[in-house]
Image: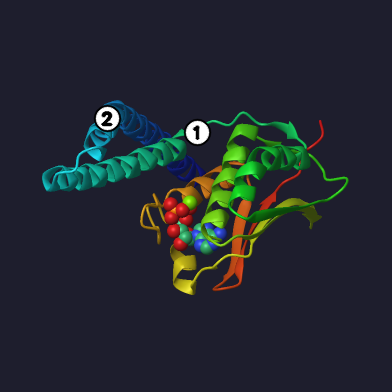
Amino acid sequence: MDSSQSQREHQDLARDHVRLQSQYAEIALLAGGLAHEIRNPLSTISLNLDLLREDLIAGESPRERRMLQKVTTLRKQCGHLERLLNDFLQFARVGSLEQQPTDLNALVSEFIDFYQPQAKEQGIEISPHLAANLPQVNIDCRLFLQVLTNLSRNAQQAMPRGGVLELQTYCRDGRVMLDIIDTGEGMTPETQTKMFDTFFSTKQDGSGLGLPTVRKIVEAHQGTILCDSEPERGTRFSISLPPATRT
Ligand SMILES: Nc1ncnc2c1ncn2[C@@H]1O[C@H](COP(=O)(O)OP(=O)(O)O)[C@@H](O)[C@H]1O
Ligand SMILES: [Mg+2]
């Protein structure tokens, strides 16, 4: 193959890439817009179902009891749709990053301050192990708080009778590491092969978008995420990030 031919192929590939990227952006925008449009009428429906429930709760006739049951089912389904839309919008919003050199330990501490009261209520002990002299990482803090929130929520849901949530930072092979470890119910090998698939969930009211969002955010930061889990013993997620390069 002569060099002008290979140059042409290279240009074609680059053009295809740009075209695909703009198509993806258009679809993401449409899907996000659609989710927004659905959210408003849905919250009106929820609100009115709440009002209906209030009216029916006082009723004593069998007819009113049956109506209350149906309205309660409808309200639950609305709640599920609302959570799904919120998780969907969160997933779709991971676009351009606002990265800045950040002390990961400070971010983890900030998250713990915010999450501690809720964890305590659920019988979950938070155990931080934050390494001294950790290099800074170049991250979008808002998105990384989302990562911590999603992983901790999963951990909490895997420990319905309480347990320990360990948050660890350390350095390994020149990478900055963040581990989130729980003592919960763990995952079967089958769940582990599917856990990052969009809409995969083993929960009755799960959206199946928590982990896909986490992975999308981590990979947008040139990071990787690995999982090690054993049924009945618990789960460890390990996130590896490149250290911020000093300029
Ligand atoms: N810490 C964990 N312990 C046990 N199972 C987990 C944990 N994190 C994730 N999973 C499994 O992975 C699935 C997908 O998680 P996720 O994408 O957050 O969706 P969702 O929480 O809505 O089900 C969960 O339904 C659950 O089966
Ligand atoms: Mg989740």
Disc marking residue 95: 1
Query: From this viewpoint, is residue 68 visible?
Result: yes
What percent of the width, then of the height, locates residue 120?
Answer: 64, 49
Which is more toward the observer, 145 or 50? 50
Type of amino acid under label 2: Leu
Q: In the rendered image, which quarter is residue 161 located in?
A: bottom right
**What secondary structure is found at the residue carrying circle 2?**
helix
What percent of the width, then of the height, locates residue 139?
Answer: 67, 36
Q: In the rendered image, which quarter is residue 88 located in?
A: top left
Measured Cα–Cα span from mark 2 to mark 1: 38 Å
Type of amino acid under label 1: Gly
Disc marking residue 51: 2
The residue that appears at 48% across and 45% down in the rendered structure is 6
The residue that appears at 41% across and 37% down in the rendered structure is 86
What percent of the width, then of the height, locates residue 63?
Answer: 11, 45
The residue that appears at 48% across and 72% down in the rendered structure is 188
Sequence-wise, the earlier of marks 2 and 1 is 2
